[in-house]
Amino acid sequence: MAIDIGLEAINRASAYWMSRTYVALDNPANDSGSINTVEIYLSSSTNSVTAGMVYLVSGTTYKVRDSESIGDIAGGSKQVVTGLDIDCESGDLIGAYSPNYFYLKIDGTGYSGVRYYSGECIDPGDEQPFSLLDGDGMSLYGTGASGGGATEKFGADTGAGADTKASGSPLAAINGSETGSGADSLPARDIALPESGSGVDALVSLQTPAAKTASDTGYGVDASVSLQAPVAKTASDNGSGVEAVPVSGAFLVGSDSGSAIEAFIDRLLAAAENGYGAEASEIGGGGLLKHLFASELGEGADGLTAKIEIPTKGGGMRLWT
Amino acid sequence: MPPVVTATFNGSGTHTKNGWLKVRFDLCYGQGSKTYPLHYVDHFDREPVEEELADEALLALIPTHKELNPTICHFITIDHETTREELEAKVREIFDADTLSQLDNLLSDVEWLDAIRWRVKEVSLRQVVQLMNASAKRGSGGIVPYSTDTKQLIEEVNARFAGLEVEVGN
């Protein structure tokens, strides 16, 4: 969007001549951006002109937002100065200053007026009370373009409007305590282990899984990642959820009862164990032999497979047939 | 024969802005151009005194002569080590024949408010702004080193380019 500020630079009925800083009250900037062209009409050549953007602080006090030196300007015809870069915010007024006689063309009636300061108030940050020349309009006009460069943002900024878009390119470094939001959460973030991550952050963390120790419970994507690097489990771990799946084998001591999925995995059962439920089924399928001693009776599947009976008749030992 | 157009280095405009060094060239269109009549204007033969400045009737009595004003003043960003030859080449590149023709046409596209007052039509002015503020026309250069004495740099630059006048568009 094009920005314009001030009144058109035409030959007007009269002219100022005193060295002052003048600010035009007519036609404030219609948008924020950068003024790149200034048009000015002087009755006579004027030295060392500086043009700037000014805004009202309070009462009659005005402050300079930005300005740029445009040098000596010829009088007697409209002068167009291009290649400038003066920051401007919506509502700003255009002003100018010359340290010598300043022959700015004006009309004395029919306009919003001109504010002046009897001295220099045109460098960025300058702030002074201005007097009013009621009804005046002066030939100073600026044009430019809306917007500007990307605003440098810090991790604590949440971003809003155009800023959120602009911050997408330079990645925001986010500390562990920050959750991130908006555009900040889009680019690749370095996540430290203490960070929980959320949304896109969580997705990114899939590419660099967090190292987990056996004591971590894991949840969400972390739990999924842990599938790729199974957790070594000790006999005292019960295992649960997805962690239980990749367990290569739980070694149960005689006192362990075993349950659920652990029972499917290759368990070494001590002689004192009876086995039941799925264990018995596994043995029955022939996958694993359970060693039964003579004193054991066996039951269920155990009884079906490898039960040995001591002969009670005949001589010597022979198999029952 | 096309009008002579000169781009003249104007040291009064040399300055730094946000660390960038900028120099000004004034583009003057000679006789035969469309903008020449608009900028060939009266100038006082001498500086008026304050009594004359405060009284327009007295001011009108001061003798005058004709001078050619620039049609446009343009700032170019340059490197602080840019040579005179490099800047001259850059000026020729910026003010090529096509650009000069466009500027002459656009800045002479005026409407008269009365017998002595004219304005360039807004639509044409917008095209001028667009044409001259394109990145290719604004020049480029490195940031002036932080430790540089800006005032001294400006003096050096003005001395380096003093009197540089480039006949452009041919």
Image: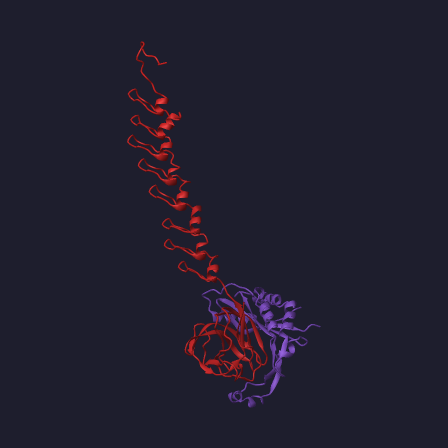
* Left or right: B73 in relation to A214: right
Kindly indicate which chain is depicted in red in the rendered structure: A
Q: Is residue B11 above or below residue A249?
A: below
Specify the farthest residue to the right. B1
Q: Which of A234 and B32 is in front in this view?
A: A234
Q: Quadrant for the N terminus of chain B, please.
A: bottom right
Q: Nearer the viewer, residue A283 or A217?
A: A283
Q: Is residue A310 above or below residue A91?
A: above
Q: Nearer the viewer, residue B126 or B62?
A: B126
Q: Position of residue A133 (x, y in %)?
A: 48, 83
Q: Residue, x 34% and y 22% (percent of image)?
A: A303
Res. A171 image quadrant: bottom left
Image coloring type: by chain
Q: Chain B is drawn in which colour?
A: purple
Q: Position of residue B118 (x, y in %)?
A: 61, 79
Regarding residue A198, the answer to whether it shows in the image is: yes
Res. A271 image quadrant: top left
Q: Position of residue A180 (x, y in %)?
A: 41, 55
Q: Quadrant for the C terminus of chain B, please.
A: bottom right
Q: Position of residue B117 (x, y in %)?
A: 61, 81
* Left or right: A308 in relation to A50: left
Q: Residue, x 57% and y 76% (percent of image)?
A: A79
Regarding residue B167, the answer to whether it shows in the image is: no
Q: Nearer the viewer, residue A4 or A86?
A: A4
